[in-house]
Each structure stands twice: as structure tokens, then as C-alpha cells.
Amino acid sequence: NEGSTAYPYRVRWTAIDDATDIDQSQVTQSDFQDLRDDAGWVNAIVGGEYGLVFQERGITRMTYVGTPEVFQMDYVERQRGAWAPRSVVPLGQGAFFLSDEGFLCSQNKSPPSRGQWQESGTKALRVFQV
């Protein structure tokens, strides 16, 4: 929420070296970006070398690119996402998460490939390469 208004599709980040500064500024690089509303509410964000934003029906990769854009947003999954807040558990460069298909695992792969699912040897868990 910002004031009394909710922005359930918005990702906001604070200034470099000041987690209390949320005022938009190219100098401090504090900013926000609104994601696709058809992917549902943002339920979790996982950080690391890049960020993963889990919406109800989608996953977006955040890559730091500096000013003026600050973060480049790439939609890496347009159907599966985290069904519920607190259902995402970071692990290395990826995360386990609860989707409408059960528990899934996002996993880093270089170079990135989008939307490729691989069976992990059990029907209860599938691995998503981001």
C-alpha cells in the first residue's frame, strides 16, 4: 500500500544504501514498476544475482541495469506462479514455490531459457529453468 491505495501488481525498491528512502529518484535509483495485472497479485520477491518476482500466475526476472531504468523486467513464465504469499522458499539462484500444479522449483540456467519445464524424477516437483 502507498498511503491508502493498494497497488497489488507493483514492485518498489528503495534507494541504494538507504532502505528508508522510497522517493523516486534517478540519483538514488529508488523507483517502482507496475507488472502485468493479468498475472495476479505480487506474492513474493526473491533476491540474488537477479530478482524473481512471483505473481499468482507468472514469474518475472528483475535484472539490474542502472539508470535510468534501474531494473529490466523480463517475464519468464506467463502461466505458473506462486499461489499464495509465504509459499515461496529461496534456494540458491531459484526458489521452491506452491503453484496451481503443486510444488515447483525455479532454477538458474545459463544462458536463460524461458518457459522450459523439466521433470525432476518425481511427479510432486517439477523444475522451471529461468
Image (cartoon, rainbow, N blue to C red):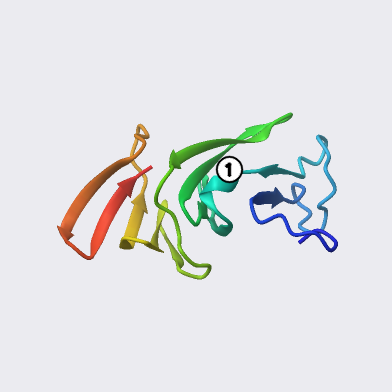
Answer above or below: position of 4 versus 32.
Answer: below
Tell me if 66 is positioned left or right of 22 in this view: left
Answer above or below: position of 111 versus 19.
Answer: above
Q: Quadrant of residue 41?
A: bottom right
Tell me if 28 is positioned left or right of 102 in this view: right
53 or 67, which is in the foreground?
53
Residue most toward the left? 121
Position of residue 2 measured from the top left corner of the image (x, y, whole percent): 80, 58
Q: Residue at x 32, y 48 (%)?
A: 128
The amino acid beneath tag 1 is Arg
Position of residue 98 measured from the top left corner of the image (x, y, whole percent): 39, 65
Residue most toward the top? 68
Position of residue 24 measured from the top left corner of the image (x, y, whole percent): 83, 43
**Callout 1: SS:** loop
| Quarter occupied by the C terminus | top left
Position of residue 26 measured from the top left corner of the image (x, y, whole percent): 81, 35
50 or 43, which is in the foreground?
43
Q: Residue at x 35, y 32 (%)?
A: 111
| Quarter occupied by the N terminus | bottom right
For mark 1, does the 10 Å Cα neighbourhood hold few (<14), some (14 to 19), or many (20 or more) residues?
Answer: some
Answer above or below: position of 7 versus 84.
Answer: above
Residue most toward the bottom? 86
Answer above or below: position of 93 versus 86.
Answer: above
Which residue was labeled with disc 1?
A: 36
Q: Residue at x 54, y 46 (%)?
A: 38
Q: Quadrant of residue 64?
A: top right
Tell me if 29 is positioned left or right of 85 in this view: right
Tell me if 98 is positioned left or right of 7 in this view: left
Q: How many marks?
A: 1
